[in-house]
Amino acid sequence: MNRAVKYGILIFALALITLGIIVGEPLEVFRKAAAVCLECIGVG
Amino acid sequence: MLGGSVRGIPYYVTGIILLYGILFGRLICGFLCPFGFVQDLLYRIKAGKMRVPRGVDAPLRKAKYVILVVFVILLPLTAGSAYGAGIPWFCKFICPAGTLQAGLPLMAVNEDLRLATGVLFAFKLSVLAVVIIAAILIYRPFCKYLCPLGAIYGLLNRWSFYGMQVDKSRCVGCGACEKTCKMDVEVRKNVNSPECIRCGACKSVCPGGAIRSEFSCAKKIIRR
């Protein structure tokens, strides 16, 4: 049972990453990561 | 990210968090998180240490799950800004990590940023001050009570590929593991508790060598 859940989550995670790459989300993430996040530092 | 995504659910980021969580569990909290490291350093300051009474500690530990659901999922999805963009509620109003590790250093060298500070920054500084004082007295209070990422990784601890194991045939029942655990994990009952950050302190004090940590998919290679 534990083994099934473990591999199930792993496959689900990889599927989400693949889906994210297909719809172009990594670019959105890198754009956010490259700029100063004003909310995070307490200004925005 | 939740509120910022046009589609509502950020597949990529969710997938990455789940992937790291299922591979390592809270090993990430123990060894990769920079704010965890800061808290470790603060706890080394020689000052009176305290253990939070169990009756207070247990409900407080659940706060991180409430924060995860309310501030990381529900509010960013439902309450956005006037322009339709989502607000990262947790980062904006609770998380002191960005204030300490980015806000203060950036403001030290950038006058424009210093001029832009206001009530929000004052509020976040006060949150940071409370967390710093708490971290001197209590071991990793942010990890125990507030961190939503720790909550996610904690939920995945019981299934993660990297995990802890107790060999009951070698356990002498001395309880040294539980006495040394600063996260207050009941090691003999639930070694892969959501609170375990895989620091390995229990493993190093076990006189019988009953506790080990390993990647469960590669037992034959890694096991001693």
Image (spheres, rainbow, N blue to C red):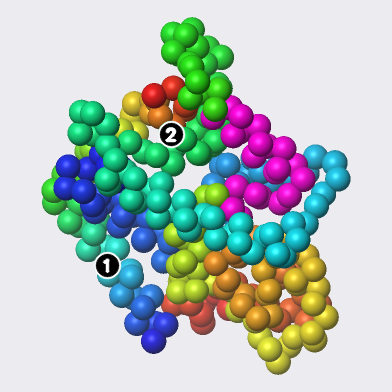
Q: Which span is picked out in magenta?
A: B124-145
Between B94 and B99, the one nearer to me in the picture? B94
- Name which residue lies at 46% across and 51% down: B67
Q: Chain of mark 2?
A: B
Q: Main secondary structure of the magenta part?
A: helix
Residue picked out by circle 2: B92
Picture residue at 39% right of the left edge, 39% below the top? B89
Query: How far apart are the two marked residues, 2 and 1, measured between alpha carbons?
Result: 29 Å
Q: In terms of depth relative to the viewer, which is nearer, B192 or B218?
A: B192
Q: Is residue B212 left or right of residue B151?
A: right
The type of residue carrying mark 2 is Lys
Question: According to the image, label 1 marks what residue?
Answer: A12
Asked where in the image residue A29 lies, by quadrant, the reply is: top left
* Mark drawn on residue B189: none
- Front residue of this view, candidates B109 and B59: B59
Chain label for disc 1: A
Residue B146, percent across and down?
55, 49
The quarter of the picture where the N terminus of chain B appears is top left
Q: Looking at this view, name the residue that lies furthest to the left.
A: A23
For the point 55% across and 67% down, the residue is B194
Asked if residue B198 shows in the view, the reply is no
Give the side of residue B192 with respect to residue B87, left or right: right
Please tell me whether residue A20 is drawn above or below residue B159 in the rendered image.
above
Residue visible at 72% across and 37% down in the picture: B133
- Location of residue A25 in the rendering, given as x and y in whole percent from the top left corner: 21, 44
Mark 2 lies on a secondary structure that is: helix
Where residue B22 sits, quadrant-wise, is bottom left
| Residue B76 visible at all | yes
